[in-house]
Image (cartoon, rainbow, N blue to C red):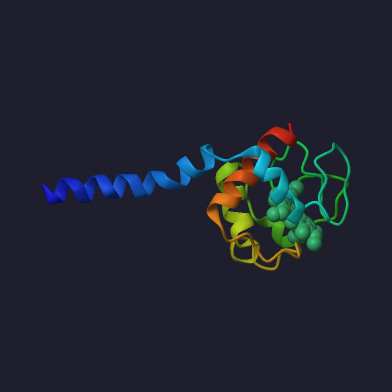
């Protein structure tokens, strides 16, 4: 019986990040985007200090022709999804060492889930 409970606990833990992503609150996420808005727009073609995040989901990292990315980001091989964005925003320098995004990371998984829920709507 204990083994079954352990197995279930393991499954619940493994599923937790995905559940958190799916449960994000876009309205709260819009507030969290305040962390990003100084550098990023969600409008098409509007590059500021950072590249436009319009249509970022499904895009390859470093793929906008009109933004000068770091070699590190271009070489990263990442395709942006809820999962890869979650990892990147948590700790950008860990995921893409020497990238040029001057942002230390959003440590709270719930905050990231909210932010991603917002981005999924706002970047369409
Ligand atoms: C101080 C400016 C700044 C802040 C704040 C910032 N970014 Fe960035 N961001 C950049 C820069 C500059 C790059 C390009 C980095 C490179 O080329 O290495 C970038 C790159 C990115 C990329 C890759 C885009 C692509 O086309 O591949 C994503 C996604 C991203 N940022 C999301 C975010 C999110 C979400 C936040 C807020 C949690 C955020 N950024 C905060 C400046 C910033």
Quarter of the image for the C terminus: give it. top right
Q: Residue at x 74, y 56 (%)?
A: 35
Percent position of residue 69, x then y: 80, 56
Percent position of residue 59, x then y: 69, 40
Query: Whereabouts is ligand 1, in terms of quadrant?
Result: bottom right
Total labels drawn: 0
State the residue in front, 101 or 2: 2
Q: Is residue 77 left or right of residue 56?
A: left
State the residue in front, 69 or 3: 3
Indicate the quadrant where residue 92 lies. bottom right
Residue 64 seen in this snapshot: yes
Q: Residue at x 76, y 65 (%)?
A: 102
Percent position of residue 9, x then y: 27, 49
Q: Is residue 86 left or right of residue 75?
A: left
Q: Residue at x 71, y 57 (%)?
A: 73
State the residue in front, 54 or 22: 22
Percent position of residue 37, x then y: 80, 51
Residue 80 seen in this snapshot: no
Q: Is residue 117 left or right of residue 11?
A: right
């Amino acid at each position: 019986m204990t083994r079954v409970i352990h197995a279930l606990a393991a499954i619940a833990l493994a599923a937790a990040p995905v559940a958190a992503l799916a449960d994000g609150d876009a309205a709260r996420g819009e507030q969290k985007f305040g962390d990003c808005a100084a550098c990023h727009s969600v409008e098409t073609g509007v590059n500021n200090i950072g590249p436009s995040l319009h249509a970022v989901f499904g895009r390859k990292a470093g793929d906008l022709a009109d933004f000068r990315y770091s070699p590190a980001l271009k070489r990263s091989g990442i395709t942006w999804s809820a999962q890869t964005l979650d990892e990147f925003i948590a700790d950008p320098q860990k995921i893409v060492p020497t990238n040029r995004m001057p942002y230390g990371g959003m440590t709270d998984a719930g905050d990231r889930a909210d932010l991603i829920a917002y981005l999924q709507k706002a970047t369409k």
